[in-house]
Image: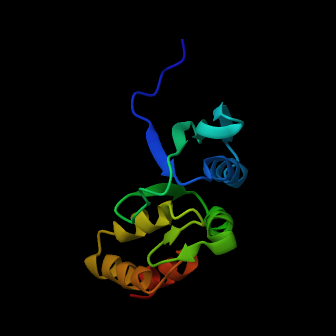
């Protein structure tokens, strides 16, 4: 029997939930649309999955907007994955921020973080860990090679 996800992230959109769902499912390779509930031909509620994580998206109107107080954290394996997701999520009006954070064109905040960042910052040598931290603080999109150089050159 398939496991049912107990807690689902619920995203409130003004009037573009279907566009957002389609964008996210096109951005992430392991994604799918589960269902659209339509009211008067327009999507009212959509359910989709990214990497096995289920989300719900509502066309709730303009009352509430996303803030940076919540973000979706993506644990990336490679620089290529970081670069690909960064490009797709900042496209068409998305905004770069600092330290691996960005805001997509819908206003949703994301953290696109390579596993290497945590590994390098966990160095048993505090000077190396600090050098990695200082390098990361200068970045928008995280660059693994630059982090590695900071770690190795300290």
The part of the image, by quadrant, that contains residue 78 is: bottom right
| Quadrant holding the N terminus | top right
55 w.r.t. 72: above or below = above
| Quadrant holding the C terminus | bottom left
Q: Residue 39 at x, y = what percent?
A: 64, 33
Between 110 and 142, the one nearer to me in the picture: 110
Q: Residue at position x 66%, y 41% from top?
A: 31
Q: Residue at position x 48%, y 83% from top?
A: 139
Q: Residue 120 at x, y = what percent?
A: 41, 69
105 w.r.t. 23: above or below = below
Number of numbered labels in the structure image: 0
- Coloring scheme of the render? rainbow
Q: Residue at position x 31%, y 81% from top?
A: 130
Q: Residue 28 at x, y = what percent?
A: 66, 51
Between 46 and 90, the one nearer to me in the picture: 46
Question: With 19 as the anchor, is 103 left or right in this view?
Answer: left
Q: Residue furthest front?
A: 40
Question: With 93 as the anchor, is 41 left or right in this view?
Answer: right
Res 143 seen here:
no
Question: With 139 as the anchor, is 79 left or right in this view?
Answer: right
Between 37 and 123, the one nearer to me in the picture: 37
Q: Residue furthest top?
A: 1
Between 18 and 108, the one nearer to me in the picture: 18
Q: Residue at position x 39%, y 66% from top?
A: 68
Q: Residue 17 at x, y = what percent?
A: 60, 48
Res 90 seen here:
yes
């Amino acid at each position: 029997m398939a496991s049912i996800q107990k807690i689902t992230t619920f995203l409130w959109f003004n009037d573009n939930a279907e566009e957002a769902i389609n964008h996210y499912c096109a951005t992430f390779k392991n994604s799918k649309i589960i269902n659209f509930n339509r009211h008067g031909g327009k999507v009212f509620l959509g359910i989709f999955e990214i990497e096995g994580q289920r989300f719900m998206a509502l066309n709730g109107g303009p009352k509430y907007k996303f803030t940076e107080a919540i973000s979706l954290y993506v644990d990336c394996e490679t620089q290529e994955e970081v670069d690909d997701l960064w490009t797709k999520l900042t496209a068409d009006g998305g905004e770069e921020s600092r330290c691996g954070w960005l805001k997509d064109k819908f206003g949703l905040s994301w953290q696109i973080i390579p596993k290497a960042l945590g590994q390098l910052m966990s160095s048993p040598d505090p000077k190396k860990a600090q050098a990695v931290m200082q390098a990361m603080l200068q970045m928008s999109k995280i660059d693994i090679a630059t982090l590695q150089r900071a770690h190795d050159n300290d």
